Image (spheres, rainbow, N blue to C red):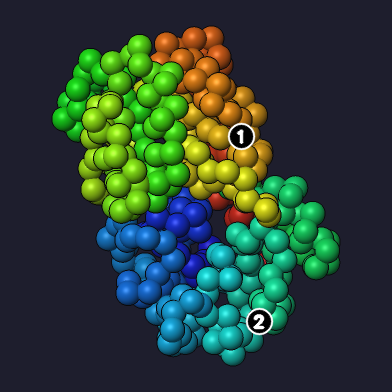
Amino acid sequence: MKIGLMGAWNTDSGASIHAEFIGREWVKAGHQLSVFSFYDYSFHGTAITNRDEDYVIRCFTTSKYPQVKFDPVPFLEEDYEVFVVEDLGMLPQDPLGKIIHWIKRKAKTVTVIHDGRLSEDPSFYQFDWDAIVGFDERYMEFLRKGYPKEMLHQIPYPCHPLRVGDMKAARRILNLPTEKKILFMFGPAAKIAADTIPWILRYGSGYPLLILVVSRDKEAIKKARQHSRNIDIEVREETLTLSQLYDYLQACNALIFNKPSSPHAVVSSMIFQCLGSGCPIIARDSNFIKTLQNEVLKFRNRKEFGESLAEALEQRERYKSIVESAKKYVHKNSAEVVAQRFIDLFEDLK
């Protein structure tokens, strides 16, 4: 099948992670993919994470760029039977709206909704999609208020495939101490994860701990270094590729996720990106992880954080349970499985 995909690609945004997970699976399965993405000077996310594949065309700016730019020619020249749009709110909607009738002449059109509520921007609704995809029932609930039920399709956010490695080997590769218990924080989310460091100081004092922060976020780095006199903290100012991220996850005893609830429906791309590593995730109980039950170590307050920390560091029964549950969840919702669900939808539309 020939597929055109418009949205973020090779950046650290949730929309990019979703697009890459399913897009690369389509390529592996033998489908022809053309990716239309943001110019490298105006992209959605905080960093470019990878070198572009030869099927990636950068031809527009984000909707937030002061002077929106949009090159329509690649959309007209490329050959595709299905046109998939990821995270429409970040795209230059009005320029796309001017050529969508030509796109619809040759392709079925599908949009994947990343916003957790109906948009207040009228430009959002100028497109007559053949199908609209939401991640879970929360998305379906608000989408049904604005769109015909028959247009809506629920397909879960994909997970990185299982890749559980050897901790000692990963630590040697990354030059990390073998005798320490390592707690991991990375990327832009590290600035919120770093707020748990005072709790780690309180509940982790009995363990030989290292807090590892891998991020270019200045606030995250500042917060981490403020505590460096009280606990062993290492900061590495890097932007990780997916392969590098999994090396770090395999080297660590736990990943800290601390995002509080959002007022609207959300999913955590970071959780789904990391769940296949085998590294336990200590996660704030918020609507970012609403669809997860026993796949992460949830905490609602400082005391529960301390309990989850002990579970992960001592590998108690609850730890073993979440590792097994995470594996089952990843198997059920792997990028390969989710990508095929999209292909099934495309076939139905054709």
Q: Which amino acid type is shown beneath numbered disc 2?
A: Ser
Judging by the rendered image, the residue that carries numbered circle 1 is: 285
Eyeballing the image, is 90 above or below 282?
below
Q: Which amino acid type is shown beneath numbered disc 1?
A: Asp
Marks 1,2: beta carbons within 8 A: no
User: Could you tell me which residue is drawn at 62 percent across and 39 percent down?
Assistant: 286
Apparent side of residue 307 relative to residue 220 in the rendered image (left or right): right
Q: Nearer the viewer, residue 300 or 156?
A: 300
Mark 1 or 2, nearer chain start: 2
Return the x and y of residue 146 as percentages of the image width and height: 80, 68
Q: Quadrant of residue 248?
A: top left
User: Could you tell me which residue is drawn at 30 percent across and 34 percent down?
Assistant: 227
Q: Nearer the viewer, residue 238 or 55?
A: 238
Apparent side of residue 191 relative to residue 171 in the rendered image (left or right): right
Q: Is residue 302 visible?
A: yes
Apparent side of residue 130 relative to residue 315 in the rendered image (left or right): right
Q: Nearer the viewer, residue 30 or 66?
A: 66
**Can you tell which mark lies on residue 123?**
2
Residue at mark 1 to residue at mark 2: CA–CA distance: 34 Å
